[in-house]
Amino acid sequence: MKKVAVILSGCGVYDGAEIHESVLTLQSILKHGGSYQCFAPDKPQLHVINHLTGEVAEGESRNVLVESARITRGKVQAITECNVDDFDLLILPGGFGAAKNLCTFAVDGAECEFDADVLSVCKAFADAGKPAAYACIAPALAAKVYGNSVNLTIGNDAGTAEALEQFGIKHQNCAVTEVIIDSEAKLVTTPAYMLGQNLLEVGEGLDKMVQAVFAMQT
């Protein structure tokens, strides 16, 4: 059974982990015979978005780890508890939280900062030669972790792709139901809701992502 570390970034597309992407990814891990443990940074999220109006909820503050527990039914650990030696591979679903709470790409673009603990874990998997998969906007972190002309995708948004290429990666346009595989880096990426219009097509891409990253782990 493949053991998967999953990093979440809160709960909710506009300020945390994208809920559909997270749940579909976890389901796919189990469907293909894996197990998972979710992790998240224990810190305040960038801001709170009212998901009904899309506006910032002034005066509200939420914790990334506590919010991530909503998705996992309480079964989530602080990112500092993630030991690369305990897992076979790493997966990061998307959502704006990946670009707001795990790094600041959503605000600062190529000049963004990265959560030190999250970056340390992601680099540990890369340095150990263990496969990893990043969905939606989460490849912004992969760009920092891998660089060095690694191939990845966030879909087909030219501005976002150009910003990521400043980290030294090679962006490839990709349909929502497909994946980009860099066999040398053992990295798989898929656009998910960067392009997706419904659960079915997003789920298809995420399932292919999980199957592809599982196939890399021997």
Image (tube, helix red, strand yellow):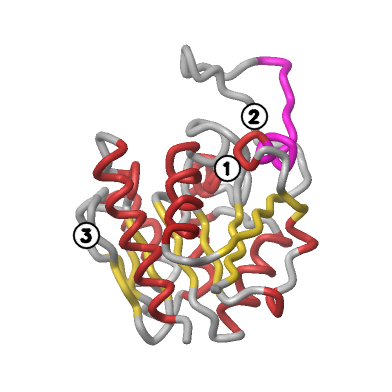
Q: Nearer the viewer, residue 77 or 48?
A: 77
| Relative side of 161 to 23, left or right | left
Q: Are marks 3 and 1 in contact (CB under 8 Å)?
A: no
Estimate the spatial distance between the alpha carbons at disc 3 and disc 2, rounded to whole Å. 30 Å
Q: Determine the image quadrant of residue 161.
A: bottom left
Q: Are marks 3 and 2 in contact (CB under 8 Å)?
A: no
Q: Which residues are magenta?
A: 58-69
Secondary structure under the numbered disc 2 in the rendered image: loop
Q: Are marks 2 and 1 in contact (CB under 8 Å)?
A: yes
Type of amino acid under label 1? Lys
Q: Nearer the viewer, residue 193 or 37?
A: 37
The numbered dot on residue 182 is none
Type of amino acid under label 2? His
- Tell me which label, 2 or 1, sits earlier in the chain: 2
Q: Determine the image quadrant of residue 135.
A: bottom left
The numbered dot on residue 173 is 3
Q: Residue placed at 25% from the left, 51% from the top?
A: 158
Secondary structure under the numbered disc 1 in the rendered image: helix
Estimate the spatial distance between the alpha carbons at disc 3 and disc 1, rounded to whole Å. 23 Å
The number of discs equals 3
Estimate the spatial distance between the alpha carbons at disc 2 and disc 1, rounded to whole Å. 9 Å
Q: Which residue is mark 2?
A: 47
